[in-house]
Image (tube, helix red, strand yellow):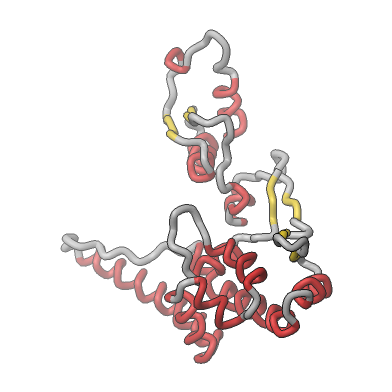
Amino acid sequence: MWRQQTRNLCSVTGGRSLKAEKWDALVIGGGHNGLTAAAYLARSGLSVAVLEHRHVIGDAASLLRPAFIKELELKRHGLKMLKRSPSSFTPCLDGRYLLLGPDKELNYSEISKFSKRDAEAYPRYENQLENFCKFMDPLLDSSPPETLQGISSFNARMKSKLQKSVFWAHCLRRALVLGQKEMVDFMDLLLSPDSLVLNNWFENDVLKATLAMDAVIGTTDPMGFCFCNFICNGNAVLYN
């Protein structure tokens, strides 16, 4: 149904003004959040108009969570996920370059051009981030517990306590699976700047510069937790 509703928006072109239509909902911004919200509203039967100033829509749609892709049946509507191979290319002023991708042998060979030590450390670095993401992944789709301040209802308070206990119990279970040492390393990653994280792992600046790209998100200060953000959301995927 939501696909039929969005067709209504596409028909408002040429001399017809958006004001001539009566919409149940207006979504300001055609980024990934706006498009997702509009799709859910339209799927529920509402007529929705998405207003976007730029000629490009979608924004960070390549980072859509798998749940959205499944619920909105995006693959049935033409979405194709393409693996990046290679995933990064870093040229140097002296003519050398660093090429990284999903091929482990290629990564070892490429990194070895700059540092044998880093080539040995890189698989361990990736493995640690993947383990951290296994810990984080279920939490990304979980609602954080609410404080419900000012609500005196006994039922509301009991519901709040139950939700909090379930949330933190889930966190505790994931932490126990991760292990004490890995949990300490995980907290260190979350609270450390990206430069400290990368300096602890690697010695070559070309590799560190390549990996630091994953920790830079908009105007956010580069922090270690951003490395997990890209891994968890599929940093080797493009959308079409």
User: Is the residue 211 above or below the residue 177 in the image?
Assistant: above
Q: Is residue 62 visible?
A: yes
Picture residue at 74% right of the left edge, 65% below the top: 98
x then y, percent, for residue 227: 56, 68
State how many labels appear.
Answer: 0
Residue most extreme to the top: 15
x then y, percent, for residue 160: 30, 67
Q: Is residue 48 visible?
A: no
Quadrant of the image for the N terminus?
A: top right
Residue most extreme to the bottom: 180
Picture residue at 44% right of the left edge, 34% below the top: 27
x then y, percent, for residue 212: 57, 66
Picture residue at 79% right of the left edge, 71% below the top: 110
Quadrant of the image for the C terminus?
A: top right
Query: Of 190 and 122, which appears nearest the observer?
Result: 122
User: Is the residue 31 above or below the residue 6 in the image?
Assistant: below
Residue 166 figure quarter? bottom left
Residue 153 figure quarter? bottom left
Q: Say left or right for 20 vs 199.
A: left
Query: Of 63 and 97, which appears nearest the observer?
Result: 97
x then y, percent, for residue 78: 72, 40
Picture residue at 66% right of the left edge, 44% below the top: 74
Residue 213 figure quarter? bottom right
Residue most extreme to the front: 94
User: Is the residue 204 above or below the residue 60 in the image?
Assistant: below
Query: Of 181 and 140, which appears nearest the observer?
Result: 181
User: Is the residue 93 above or below the residue 35 in the image?
Assistant: below
